[in-house]
Amino acid sequence: MTYDPATIQALKKDASEWFSTLRDNICAAFEKLEAEAQGPFFKEADEGGHFERKPWTRLDADGNPGGGGVMSMMRGRVFEKVGVHISTVHGVLAPDFRSQIDGAEHDPHFWAAGISLIAHPWNPHAPTAHMNTRFIVTTQAWFGGGADLTPMLASKRDKTESDSAFFHDAMRKACSMHAPAGSYEKFNDWCDEYFYLNHRKEPRGTGGIFYDRHWTGNPQQDLAFTKDVGNAFLEAYPEIMRRNISKEWTEAERVEQETQRGRYVEFNLLQDRGTLFGLKTGGNIESILSSMPPRVRWP
Amino acid sequence: MTYDPATIQALKKDASEWFSTLRDNICAAFEKLEAEAQGPFFKEADEGGHFERKPWTRLDADGNPGGGGVMSMMRGRVFEKVGVHISTVHGVLAPDFRSQIDGAEHDPHFWAAGISLIAHPWNPHAPTAHMNTRFIVTTQAWFGGGADLTPMLASKRDKTESDSAFFHDAMRKACSMHAPAGSYEKFNDWCDEYFYLNHRKEPRGTGGIFYDRHWTGNPQQDLAFTKDVGNAFLEAYPEIMRRNISKEWTEAERVEQETQRGRYVEFNLLQDRGTLFGLKTGGNIESILSSMPPRVRWP
């Protein structure tokens, strides 16, 4: 994961701009869904939603400006709650964390940019989705991220079910373009391993891909792969939403959805490395916890 | 926290029986509240609730019987969800945990009994409550536990508010009988320190008492103190419930309550040592997570 200093500045700029472009494209696709949906809608929500953007800035541990980001949140009639956040942060890692981040052991300077999305639809038939990609630079550099699907109804929590199969096809295609051979299989396994609730001994959802410390030595290709993942998500998830949002649901299905969301909360607060790292390092609480489902049950 | 082996067996029996007796008394008091309440009730719940008991057994790491417990859960018209659990467990601590438990470094045998309660009332005016006391024996022995109140409405989240002041008076009285001088002040501070959400920089509720590794050298007195805590809770909390359960509430207050419950979830999954220890050591998931609030919002 060593890099050529002469090219890293341009790569940072390209990556940062890409995350912003992808955010714009995803928000536009989700607002289109909100505008075109025909229902049925929940009585609490009958107007098409629009994203609200909120910028935030970060102070580094030493009190100097440390970058920031923009949260985009929408509460609509298709999406009960969805956040699409971008950030570009930099500074000096606190001593406690230097040994945990590759390449920061002897030089604590870091730079990181990324996009992070979690979508909680109203309709229990529509799966919850997560997508996050990032570019990190210390004395080493690498890409990481992934995208995965979490159907809320037990009847749909199977990789071979049509929504999940469609999502996996999109991720397989993304891996086939600019990632090394065998990447989909490897990243699919990694995803299943990562999004596994240890205490319940059950998977969070039906998977997707997860990758980290991705650095083939060809940074342009690695950035292209990260773009492919974002574009695959943009193609697949709105289409999966379109297939589900006009379906009628029962009260029992809504209860099942809200209960399954509890597993999402458990995973995020007990296991998710990004969430825990953010909370422990004084990250933006509002942004980190904006991924929490809007209504949840533990019956 | 060293003990006289000749007396420890009798103390284990006394403590274990006390937790069972306290459980019976608390369940009876809560069922009385359910039976006598006049409303208003939520439309989802109009019948008085009764506790359902469910025994469970524990296998020790070596596959031998390791004790067990009884869960008592009630979902009624006053209590949306309340659990009052007792357990008596014993065995050999896994190697990873020996250094974390006093007196287990060189001899991994342990014995522990306790009672644990979390009550989530329907009415947003009624505070959530937690009470837990325990007796633990390794090569050392000690009592631990406490009780604390979490008002759900911002207007009531103040130690001087009448419910919280009444609760603190009861805990102060409990500390005045069989605990060393100054215990209330010490245990009150300890409670505030323990039930503090680090990531949000806010207290979970209005406190109460928290104590651990309690061992004065007079075990009968220490058990008597632990009984005083349980009895104080039994006197104070049902009375606080009676003062609140006939109050009308608004939809906005219900939303505020469900949102505040999110903080309870965050504390339990991010910080509570008992919850995290239980989940990581293969404890009874159903019992450990039965404390989660029934309906929660992260708006």
Image: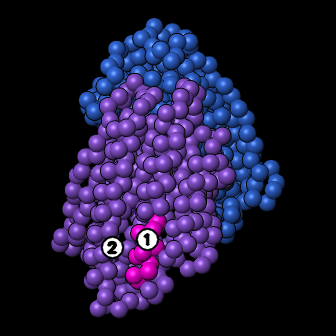
Chain colours: A purple, B blue
**Residue A101 position (above or below residue A263):** below
Give coordinates of residue B130: x percent, y percent. Answer: 48, 36
Give coordinates of residue A234: x percent, y percent. Answer: 43, 56
Residue name at image x 53 percent, y 28 percent: A248
With B28 as the anchor, is A268 left or right in this view? Answer: left
Name the N-terminal-most of marks 2 and 1: 2
Chain on which label 2 sits: A
Amino acid found under the numbered disc labelled 2:
Ala
Give coordinates of residue A2: x percent, y percent. Answer: 42, 89
Q: Which residue is mark 2?
A: A15
Q: Is residue A224 magenta?
A: yes
With A76 as the anchor, is A194 left or right in this view? Answer: right
Residue name at image x 49 percent, y 76 percent: A178
Q: Secondary structure at mark 1?
A: helix
Q: Is residue B294 magenta?
A: no
Tell me the tag on residue A226. Answer: 1
**Residue A64 position (above or below residue A155):** below
Give coordinates of residue B211: x percent, y percent. Answer: 46, 47
B52 vs B67, nearest the viewer: B52
Tell me the tag on residue A134. Answer: none
Can I make out residue B22 in this image? no
Residue name at image x 37 percent, y 50 percent: A29
The region drawn magenta spans: A219-229
